[in-house]
Amino acid sequence: MKRSATEVLRRGFDSTLANWPLILIRIAEGIVFVGIVIAAVVAAVVPIAVAAGLSKFDISGSSNPAEAVAAAIVQHWMLIVYLLLILTLVLLVLVAIHSFVEAGSAQVFVDAERRAKPVAAPRRDVFSVFSIDRWMAGGRQGWWSIFWIYNATWSVAGLIILIPLLITMVLMVAASEAAGKVVAGCAGLLLSVIVAIPVAVVTAIWTQKAITICVARAATTGVALRSAWDEMRADFGRHFAVAFVLFMISFGGAMVISTLSMPFQIGQHQHSVFSLAFAPLQIISSFAQTIFSAAVGAWFLASFVALTEDR
């Protein structure tokens, strides 16, 4: 018998708490991400500053700013290529790191679920199977396939979301009046949002399902993607219910933490004393947000493992 969405969420919650070091690993992942992004920004800004200083680029005195910008692009095309390469490299590194973390975490949750499966009403401690060796082994074995799962699913989503944006651009170019361009732009933006939200939700479910299948069944990227899509379509109600509840918890928790930290921001832009006094509380609030996001992310993965392993 298939488990209800409530039972899936409960098992995922118990597995997450029983294997709580996975939350710490996700927090460490976020810290590493911040360090990589800061290093990338420094690597990108320094050449821009040097190039701007050498060329004395200034469009304020130009009679045709558009031509000045075009000339600057032609003059500094190598710098633009360099920035694109930096951006691409950073994105690939971040996805690769996250893929390793997800692969290792999924392996732990799969082993936890299989350990608790024979027990009719498992206690939380039955799910406790975490070890760093188990996590590392799962990461090494599955990260490459999961890396391509992320690239495949979100590339498809990006192409779908790009369609209304391209239509909007065509309509704005075709419109002869300024009012027509504004109407086309606003309507196109609204259409893009309407398309993007369900596409992002379905893609997130598809991706998470593919990751769990990839690890639980030692499937290749292609097999995991096809199986995930078929199983998600065949049982969309449960998959959507689990994802929707966790999306709402994630959104609601983030809003609560932001609301609680809002009083600390009063007056800090006008008075440096307030900024200095409430700086520790701001840091605590940001750290609480990070912990909460990491916990919900682990719960999301554990729940989809419970959803996949009830076959």
Image (tube, rainbow, N blue to C red):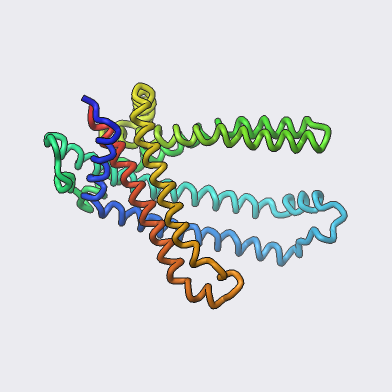
Residue drawn at the location 21% of the way across and 51% of the way down: 133
Residue drawn at the location 24% of the way across and 42% of the way down: 109
Residues 191 and 228: in front is: 191
Q: Residue 48 at x, y = what percent?
A: 65, 61
Question: Is 117 above or below relative to 277?
Answer: above
Residues 236 and 251: in front is: 251
Q: Quadrant of the N terminus?
A: top left
The residue positioned farthest toward the bottom in the image shown: 273
Q: Residue 100 at x, y = what percent?
A: 34, 47
Q: Can residue 140 be spotted in the picture?
A: no
Q: Residue 86 at x, y = what percent?
A: 55, 53
The residue positioned farthest toward the right in the image shown: 63
Residue drawn at the location 23% of the way across and 39% of the way down: 110
The residue positioned farthest toward the left in the image shown: 119
How many dots with numbers?
0
Residue drawn at the location 87% of the way across and 55% of the way down: 63
Residues 53 and 128: in front is: 128
Question: Is 119 above or below relative to 234?
Answer: below
* Quarter of the view holding residue 46: bottom right
* Quarter of the view holding residue 211: top left
Q: Residue 181 at x, y = what percent?
A: 76, 36
Q: Quadrant of the C terminus?
A: top left
Say left or right for 253 vs 164: left
Question: Is 39 above or below relative to 141?
Answer: below
Say left or right for 170 vs 302: right
* Quarter of the view holding residue 187: top right
Q: Can residue 285 be spotted in the picture?
A: yes
